[in-house]
Amino acid sequence: MSAPEEMTNAWEAAYQRFETREQEMQKFLRRLRKAGAPTWRKEAQVVEIFCGRGTGLHALQHLGFKRLEGVDFSAASRDIVIVQGGLHHLPELPADLEKVVSEVRRVLRPGGRFMVVEPWRTPFLRFVHWVGSFKFARRAWDKLDALETMTELEWVTYDQWLLNPDLVLRCLDGNFVTERKLIGWGKLMWVGRNGVISA
């Protein structure tokens, strides 16, 4: 097994320990409700990029959305594109973020929504990582150990993401009409519209 495969397997194992599918589902439902998803058109075509296990798609389905796709950048336009925890894995900022944003703009219809939920440097996140720096804390709480393991394995991109909040927000706010921006508890939740909202 190559070093990248070992790292991927170790990250995946930590992710499995971090939260169960049910815990992830409840987290995604909370996020979607907070972002205003229950008020969005249920017939909208939704694409979730970097969708991982697909739990975000199941959460959207639970909220009544029926036209769902994961990681599909076909030429057809979509109403909503969602990414939950995938952008902080991009290796090159700002270049890779600009490519993703450009592709999202390409597939979104005018007025379509782009939802982003990513880690964000807040006092809470700093505190969590500080607590996670103690071995006894990691031994006492498996979820904390799983988080710290994932963070260690993705440190280069994770740290790059957290150190560039202005760049990230400039890219998002500069390419979409910001509808919602919430920062707290170590997360950025951002929702924007593609250009002028059609009638």
Image: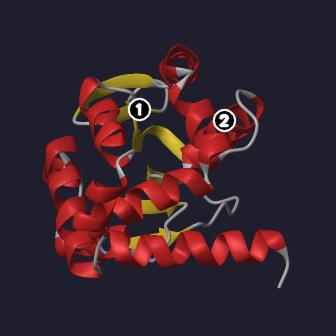
Say whether residue 68 is left or right of residue 50.
Answer: left
In this view, the residue farthest toward the bottom is 1
In this view, the residue farthest toward the front is 136
Q: Position of residue 14 (x, y in %)?
A: 46, 71
Tell me the kind of residue under disc 1: Arg
Structural crowding at the residue carrying mark 1, measured as other residues with C-alpha within 10 Å and reported as few (<14), some (14–19) or many (≥20): many
Q: Residue at x 66, y 72 (%)?
A: 8
> In the image, which disc is placed on residue 172?
none
> In the image, which disc is placed on residue 97?
2
* Element assignment for label 2: helix
Tell me the kind of residue under disc 2: Leu
Q: Which residue is drawn at 50% across and 70% down?
A: 52
Q: Where is residue 191 in the image (x, y as percent from the top left)?
A: 35, 35
Q: Mark 1 points at which residue?
A: 193
**Eyeballing the image, is 198 above or below 8?**
above
Of the numbered discs 1 and 2, the one sitting upstream in the chain is 2
Q: Quadrant of residue 64?
A: bottom left
Colour theme: secondary structure
